């Protein structure tokens, strides 16, 4: 209890029993018409009143039982007499809010004289228009005297009031303001393009580093890595434009999500592809193209048939949280084991990105929190430049050694000693920048005709379902961040259907992964406050132009692998944190939710680890960080046919699929209220901000279930 007998705690009476509630406080009655802050300070010290220590802010820390007891005791108090012409007691304006703020509102009584509040007293305000003219006349006369006395201790009225009334209170963090640019806002064309481009620059981990992992695992060259990066930039720009016009119309970037990285690595490390020596990359890419295109049909059917609107009642934060968290945690076996090949690059990268996002997150340059928004690209640029100077200075050694020769075939002792540094640290290893053309236009079927097989399509189908669960949580969170109404079920189904179409385009062009909403984009919207749909569209158009420059993709392909792995350690941890943050909508402390989320996360890591025990031959062929993705070929599940066994082993080795299945089953079978589960609330009818453009809306009039 902060109030003891009407006095502040610590005044020698700390052992007394609490007095009546609300506490009896001597009313503040001004001596004359002009309210003096000194009188208010004197009254606060005499009575012990302090809004930071009174019931106004401490009520939020009380339990529900204590609040109910105090409410009942307040109701038993005799009613106060009606206000008279006498000066009304002044109790400073309260700052409490929320559910307990109602009780605090019963305690503080701000009547006519108090209407000006503490803020007006701080500014020397007046309480009536008649006294306003007098104050304006006296203001010029007192201005010089105030400026002379301002620096003297004890003569600043504002300081007196702050020290007297608000002493001992911690600075409350202001509630987040609305977005700087709302969903339908616009601005000058250059600013819109810049604001839109920052969305894509802050997502470098997904748009650039994805191919740096996948293409080398598929046996691709540096030139092929550069081509895949350019293709991924093109598809990301095109699908983002489509989503902003025909999807949910929220400012969400579409791209190759990490949901598809694990199944792509799973297919790339199948037994049938391990022994290929000629055109290995193209064979695997064609297999991935067919699997992505076939698996995305499920999303198209779920969306445009309206079935997704029926499934929304089963998808809640308790399901979304462990599913998205498992997407980020699934790559722990790749992260630092790959980054540790060159600690001279990876450790500074990790330290720098943490410095930018944590210690410098509040530093603003030109009104923008540059270090928080562009933490990954800025840190990568700095460390990459340092690695370039170290390479030029001969710090890593291995000059003249070829990085394409396997370690077992290296004959020179000097090259064998520096083999790891040559591949992971040096910046002059890639020859893509010298060989790439200035202009290169990615085109459909550039890797050949896709191949379709049941087992690989079955694996990608489940990856698409997990991506849909992730997107549902992103849609609801993005609507809150941009200050828009929650989308209707029809708008959500429309977005899922379009994501299926976007994945088909990604498979047609050959990016190696499907296209879906990037979870990391929520962090960018929250940090920048830029929610303009038009800005995102211009940024996507600029990204399409960059994708046509072959040198851009080649430059990005020359990033050292250890540097990319270190940056991905942060990106994957951010994805996991974004997933767990969905629990803020539910009752996170509920035993029901704690058990569901904890068990789903644990079992999503443990089941794939169990399947890895059945691959003894893979340990002799594959590096350690790729072993989790070889379980499909030799897993314990045997269902008669080789194709079906491969498909089931592959699905069970995907962490996100296991987490989603377990959480979905438990959350919808264990009883729990909607409040406890944090069930998403969708609009009954489609709000105006999600309406399709008029020319397109006419084509969808017959499809009522897509909003």
Image (cartoon, rainbow, N blue to C red):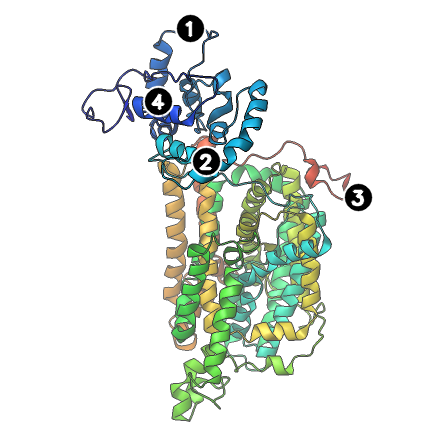
Q: Secondary structure at mark 2?
A: helix
Which mark's residue is nearer the viewer, 1 or 2? 1
Report which residue position mark 3 lands on.
699
**Where residue 309 sits: x, y (%)?**
61, 39
Q: At 42% from the left edge and 81% from the top edge, which residue is drawn? A: 421
Image side of residue 572 versus residue 18, left or right: right
Q: Nearer the viewer, residue 148 or 575?
A: 148
Nearest to the eye among marks 2 and 4: give it. Answer: 4
Residue located beneath label 2 in the image: 677
Disc nearer the start of the sequence (3/1):
1
* Sequence-earlier tag: 3 or 2: 2
Q: Earlier in the sequence, mark 4 or mark 1?
A: 4
- Front-most of 646 and 474? 474
Res 611 → quadrant: bottom left
Residue contact at pointers 3 and 4, CB within 8 angstroms: no
Residue located farthest toward the bottom when viewing the structure as drawn = 412
Label 2 or label 4, whichever comes before in sequence order = 4
**Disc 3 on helix, strand or loop?**
helix
State the image quarter where residue 312 is shown. Answer: top right
**CB-based contact (under 8 Å), mark 4 and mark 1:** no
Q: Secondary structure at mark 1?
A: loop
* Circle 2 residues within 10 Å: few <14, some 14–19, many ≥20: many
Q: Which residue is mark 4?
A: 43
């Amino acid at each position: 209890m902060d109030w003891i007998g009407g006095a502040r705690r610590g005044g020698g009476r700390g052992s007394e029993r609490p007095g009546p509630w609300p506490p009896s406080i001597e009313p503040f009655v001004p001596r004359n018409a002009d309210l003096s802050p000194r009188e208010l300070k004197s009254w606060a010290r005499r009575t012990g009143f302090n809004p930071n220590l009174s019931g106004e802010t401490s009520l939020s820390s009380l339990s529900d039982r204590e609040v109910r007891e105090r409410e009942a005791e307040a109701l038993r108090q005799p009613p106060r007499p009606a206000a008279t012409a006498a000066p009304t007691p002044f109790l400073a304006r309260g700052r409490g809010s929320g559910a307990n703020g109602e009780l605090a509102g019963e305690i503080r009584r701000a009547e006519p004289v108090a209407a000006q509040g503490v803020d007006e007293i701080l500014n020397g305000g007046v309480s009536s228009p008649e006294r306003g003219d007098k104050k304006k006349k006296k203001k010029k006369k007192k201005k010089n005297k105030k400026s002379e006395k301002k620096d003297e201790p004890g003569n600043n009225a504002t300081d007196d009031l702050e020290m007297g009334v608000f002493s001992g209170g911690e600075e409350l963090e202001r509630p987040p303001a609305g977005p700087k640019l709302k969903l339908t806002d616009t601005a000058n064309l250059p600013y819109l393009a810049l604001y839109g481009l920052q969305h894509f620059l802050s997502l470098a981990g997904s748009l650039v580093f994805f191919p740096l992992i996948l293409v080398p695992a598929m046996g691709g060259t540096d030139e092929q890595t550069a081509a895949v990066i350019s293709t991924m930039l093109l598809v990301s720009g095109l699908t983002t434009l489509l989503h902003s016009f025909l999807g949910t119309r929220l400012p969400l970037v579409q791209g190759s999500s990490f949901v598809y990285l694990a199944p792509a690595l799973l297919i790339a490390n199948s037994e049938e592809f391990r022994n290929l020596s000629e055109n290995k990359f193209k064979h695997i890419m064609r297999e991935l193209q067919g699997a992505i295109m076939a698996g995305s049909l499920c999303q198209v059917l779920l969306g445009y048939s309206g079935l997704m609107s029926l499934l929304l009642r089963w998808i809640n934060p308790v399901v979304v949280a462990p599913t998205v968290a498992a997407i980020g945690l699934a790559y722990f076996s790749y992260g630092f084991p790959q980054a540790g090949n060159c600690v001279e690059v990876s450790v500074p990268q990790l330290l720098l990105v943490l410095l930018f996002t944590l210690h410098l997150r509040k530093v603003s340059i030109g009104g923008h929190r540059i270090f928080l928004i562009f933490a990954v690209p800025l840190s990568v640029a700095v460390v990459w430049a340092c690695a370039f100077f170290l390479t030029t200075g001969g710090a890593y050694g291995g000059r003249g050694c070829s990085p394409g020769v396997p370690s077992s075939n290296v004959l020179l002792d000097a090259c064998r000693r520096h083999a790891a540094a040559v591949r992971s640290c040096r910046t002059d290893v890639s020859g893509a920048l010298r060989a790439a053309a200035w202009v290169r236009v990615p085109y459909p079927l550039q890797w050949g005709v896709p191949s379709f097989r049941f087992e690989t399509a079955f694996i990608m189908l489940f990856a698409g379902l997990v991506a849909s669960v992730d997107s549902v949580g992103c849609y609801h969170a993005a609507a809150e961040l941009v200050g828009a109404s929650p989308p209707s079920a029809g708008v959500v189904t429309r977005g899922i259907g379009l994501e299926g179409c976007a994945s088909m385009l990604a498979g047609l062009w050959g990016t190696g992964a499907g296209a879906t909403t990037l979870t990391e984009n929520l962090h960018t919207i929250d940090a920048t406050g830029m929610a303009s749909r038009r800005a995102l569209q211009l940024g996507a158009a600029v990204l399409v132009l960059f994708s046509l420059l072959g040198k851009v993709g080649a430059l990005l392909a020359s990033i050292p692998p250890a540097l990319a792995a270190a940056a991905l350690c942060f990106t994957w941890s951010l994805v996991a944190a974004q997933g767990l943050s969905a629990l803020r909508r539910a009752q996170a402390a509920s035993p029901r939710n704690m058990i569901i989320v904890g068990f789903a996360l644990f079992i999503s890591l443990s089941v794939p680890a169990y399947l890895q025990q059945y691959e003894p031959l893979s340990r002799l062929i594959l590096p350690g960080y790729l072993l989790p993705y070889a379980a499909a070929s030799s897993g314990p599940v045997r269902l008669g046919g080789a194709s079906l066994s491969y498909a089931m082993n592959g699905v069970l080795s995907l962490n996100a699929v296991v987490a989603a299945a377990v959480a979905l089953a438990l959350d919808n079978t264990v009883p729990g209220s909607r409040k406890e589960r944090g069930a998403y609330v969708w609009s009954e009818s489609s709000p105006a901000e999600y309406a399709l453009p008029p020319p397109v809306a006419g084509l969808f009039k017959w499809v009522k279930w897509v909003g």
